């Protein structure tokens, strides 16, 4: 349950509506009870394999007699001890250390008032980290769900005959609030959107602090492309702000137009769940993608590789836009239900020939869920079982 | 004095500000008194060479004893007789017939109350007709100025030592009003902008029926490119209107943003005449061009050839946008004062290699003027003298 912005990136910083969607590229977490008196963490995506004696970890808990956690707020004493423990260099943590910090924080917070359990956690992700697609949120949501289950705060939802199962609304809210703590540890000041999408799946509307899951959305086939051009979200957000200050009479209407795109898109997607889906629905979705991509270029967050993505896919009749911060990074290409798999394969090959990574997936899929082993692809099972 | 829209095409149809500029690609008209009792008209650009006996033309005047012309209104009886005379096929006139009709209308209206003079008129234009660059207005303005001079309604401004001379404001207004009649004959329902630009030159701001010549504007070097893709202005205007009706919350802000572009551009150009011109002035002009080109694509009036124009010029660091109706047609590329002529030549060659026509010229030049023969390029003189 990675996250992409369908419409409204950057405009959301300036108070406009954005739509965040769940990508059906998933992060899998396996938690096993062990008897070796150790906590083991295996993150094969980033070559991180660590284990600690339970006694060692126990020392990190400043409240061994238990203390209730405040919602949406970190226990700064635990964070301080953990940062010392994992080893902070120049105030910065690398991806692996961030992931460990988030795990240990939730683990200690949830189990700290009692006995710490001996366990091994393995996580495998279908997407590389750092592509700006909410990989940390996907990880945090999995962590929260697995550890909340393990400590008994939420039930194990999977019945014997199920392939997958989800939690009830109340449990999802608890998962989301702990995932948000993980995000706070990793990001400092997260918007809360990524973990909400990872938890509820589907699509979320967000605008100045309000995050509203949309009740029903259609599943849309997409190609996800990573141009692999590195960029700084902070620099790009500042660039847009500068341009608004430089040309307010030109740029403020562009933000209003993006708001109109998000709202129109939300309306069309809602119609697609309540009436027969027609080609015209897809025509509109494609038009909205094209208009928004132009607006993002106007905001100054385009990139020649993103122009290439749009041009290459358009030669196959497909429409693309950047997703997220822009300036490189990732783009999404809408596929129609009738788009032939040969066309998709050829387009993906064209994009790979440009030096991009490319995945066929869908948006609007489910959020966090528990899987029975038979519902998981063998290659993923193999990796999770290996560690 | 051809005309290009610098910013605001299409948006002007919806009540927004547009900036029209005079292109320094010119139309030359030579009028000679003759003694053969004939009216001769030579339009070598469109292979049109005709002459009539004065007696024949005299019959076309419904008011041989003279009748005052109403301003901004055609004498429909003359128009009716002229249409019969030049031969209307299926209610339509080709370019040559239109040009003849406009000439005869102004000729008869100005001289009709007295003796019709025997004369030969030759017109040569540096740009082909029908490129959507106000070729008919350039022609109408020349016609009006030459015939008003010939009938003594305005003075001959050229002094012996001058190379070129312009008329006073009052005379220009008379020229403009007669040029507008020519445009009414050719176009049916012209906006009046093209003939105003051809008359006053420089740059005009126009918005819902108001046309305001800007007092001082800098001369800007440009490349003018004709993609040679034919298009219908009517169809393109309708397309934009449909898109506004389909997505009002998205498209109305885009029109507002275009309005902001025109006003910002006007402000920058005005600053360029009152303070030292800097690179930053050009940076802003380039940014405005890029933003407007994206907006025109959003309006649905782009074209793959125009994308090519933008891409090809950008590889040389130059910024382009369509001008006029779009959907093919013409584009302009801003050149900086420091842009090396070798870069300009190579860019022009790149564009010609794409199958486009390309001219280096400038915008913001003078409107209608009288030339001494020495101020005219030999090749133009040769053509005008040949006929």
Image (spheres, coloured by chain):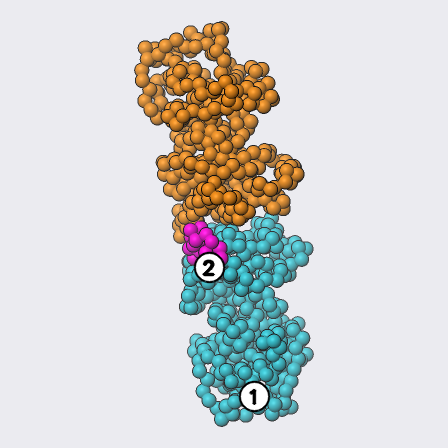
Chain colours: A cyan, B orange
For the stretch drawn in magenta, the main secondary structure is helix
Q: Is residue A374 above or below residue B139?
A: below
Residue stretch in magenta: A241-262
The quarter holding residue A340 reads bottom right
Where's the C terminus of chain A, which quadrant? bottom right
Q: Which residue is drawn at 68% across and 55% down?
A: A353
**Pick the front one: B209 or B76:** B209
Query: Could one spot residue A147 in this view of the protein?
Result: no
Q: Which chain carries label 2?
A: A
- Asked if the stretch drawn in magenta spans residue A243, the answer is yes
Q: What element carries label 2?
A: helix
Instruction: Return the residue at label 1.
Output: A60
Query: Could one spot residue A195 in this view of the protein?
Result: yes
Q: What element carries label 1?
A: loop
Where's the N terminus of chain A, which quadrant? bottom right
C-alpha gap between disc 2 and disc 1 = 41 Å
Residue A24, x across and y down, in percent? 55, 66
Mark sitting on residue A11 = 2
Judge from the rendering whether residue B297 lies leftward or rightward of residue B355; answer left or right: left
Q: Which residue is drawn at 41% across and 68% down?
A: A210
Q: Is residue A157 above or below residue A297?
A: below
Crowd band around label 1 with a 10 angstrom C-alpha radius: few (<14), some (14–19), many (20+): many
Q: Residue at x 52, y 74 (%)?
A: A188
Q: In this view, does A13 lie above or below A292?
A: below
**Pick the front one: B382 or A346:** B382
Q: In this view, does B217 lie above or below A108?
A: above
**Pick the front one: B106 or A50:** B106
Residue B154, x across and y down, in percent? 40, 19
């Amino acid at each position: 349950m990675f996250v992409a912005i369908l419409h409204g990136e950057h405009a959301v910083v300036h108070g406009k509506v954005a739509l965040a969607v769940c990508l059906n590229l998933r992060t899998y977490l396996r938690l096993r009870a062990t008897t070796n008196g150790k906590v083991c963490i295996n993150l094969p995506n980033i070559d991180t394999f660590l284990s600690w004696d339970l006694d060692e970890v126990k020392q990190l808990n400043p409240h061994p007699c238990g203390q209730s956690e405040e919602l949406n707020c970190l226990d700064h004493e635990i964070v301080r001890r953990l940062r010392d423990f994992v080893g902070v260099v120049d105030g910065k943590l690398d991806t692996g250390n961030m992931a460990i910090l988030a795990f240990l924080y939730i683990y200690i917070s949830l189990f700290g008032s009692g006995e710490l359990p001996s366990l091994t956690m393995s996580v495998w992700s279908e997407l590389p980290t750092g592509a700006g697609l909410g990989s940390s949120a996907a990880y945090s949501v999995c962590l929260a769900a697995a550890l909340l289950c393990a400590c008994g705060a939420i039930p194990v939802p999977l019945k014997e005959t199920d392939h997958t199962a989800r939690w009830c609304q109340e449990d999802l809210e608890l998962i989301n609030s702990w995932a948000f703590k993980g995000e706070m540890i990793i990001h400092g000041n997260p918007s809360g959107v990524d973990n909400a999408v990872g938890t509820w799946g589907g699509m979320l509307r967000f605008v100045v602090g309000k995050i509203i899951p949309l009740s029903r959305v259609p599943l849309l086939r997409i190609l996800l492309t990573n141009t692999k051009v590195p960029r700084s979200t902070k620099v790009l957000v500042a660039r847009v702000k500068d341009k608004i200050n430089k040309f307010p009479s030109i740029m403020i209407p562009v933000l209003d137009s993006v708001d109109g795109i998000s709202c129109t898109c939300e309306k069309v997607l809602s119609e697609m769940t309540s009436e027969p889906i027609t080609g015209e629905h897809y025509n509109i979705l494609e038009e909205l993608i094209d208009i928004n991509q132009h607006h993002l270029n106007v905001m100054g967050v385009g990139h020649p590789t993103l122009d290439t993505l749009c041009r290459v896919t358009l030669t196959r009749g497909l429409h693309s836009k950047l997703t997220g911060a822009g300036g490189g990074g990732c783009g999404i290409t809408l596929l129609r239900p009738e788009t032939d798999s040969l066309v998709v394969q050829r387009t993906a090959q064209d994009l790979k020939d440009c030096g991009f990574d490319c995945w066929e997936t869908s948006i609007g899929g489910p959020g966090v869920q528990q899987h029975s082993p038979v519902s998981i692809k063998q290659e993923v099972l193999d990796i999770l079982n290996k560690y």
